[in-house]
Image: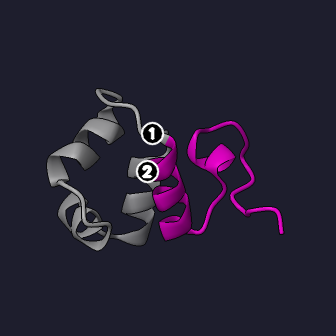
Amino acid sequence: MRLKELRKKRGISQLKLAMDLNMNQNSISRYETGEREADYATLIRFADYFNVSIDYLLERTDIPEMNK
């Protein structure tokens, strides 16, 4: 998952992302390391937050834009 890459590109910490999404920083860390897999609702939250498609987030495409 490109979560860490997107977060670093935006220049925000795991804690900031967790606070913005009302999540635990430890969960963000586990998603980034692959220790934990995000459910559908969480994937949608990440994709919406970074304004990318879920396919981009999951590295199924290199095109970040969501289809309109």
Mark number displayed over residue 52? none
In magenta segment, residue 9:
no
The quadrant where residue 64 appears? bottom right
Q: Compared with residue 1, is residue 44 higher up or lower down, i.e. above or below?
A: below
Instruction: Report crowding for label 2: few under 14, some 14 to 19, many 20 or more residues within 10 A (C-alpha).
Output: few
Identify the residue under disc 1: 39
| Residue found 41% across the figure and 39% down from its top | 38
Q: Viewed as shown, does residue 13 lie left or right of 38?
A: left
| Residue found 62% across the figure and 38% down from its top | 59
Can you say which quadrant of the picture contains the C terminus? bottom right
Q: Viewed as shown, does residue 40 lie left or right of 3?
A: right
Circle 2 sits in a helix, a strand or a loop, which is it? helix
The quadrant where residue 66 appears? bottom right
Q: Viewed as shown, does residue 52 lie left or right of 20?
A: right
- Write down the region rendered in magenta: 40-68
Name the spot of residue 22 as percent of width and height, x first. Answer: 25, 66
The amino acid beneath tag 2 is Thr
Q: Are marks 2 and 1 in contact (CB under 8 Å)?
A: yes
**Depth check, front residue: 41 or 31:** 41
| Residue found 48% across the figure and 68% down from its top | 49
Name the spot of residue 1 as percent of width and height, x first. Answer: 49, 39
Q: Compared with residue 51, is residue 40 higher up or lower down, i.e. above or below?
A: above
Circle 1 sits in a helix, a strand or a loop, which is it? loop
**Depth check, front residue: 19 or 61:** 19
Instruction: Report crowding for label 1: few under 14, some 14 to 19, many 20 or more residues within 10 A (C-alpha).
Output: few
In magenta segment, residue 66:
yes
Instruction: Give how far apart the Cα atoms at labels 2 and 1 are.
Output: 5 Å
Mark number displayed over residue 42? 2
| Residue sitting farthest toward the top | 35
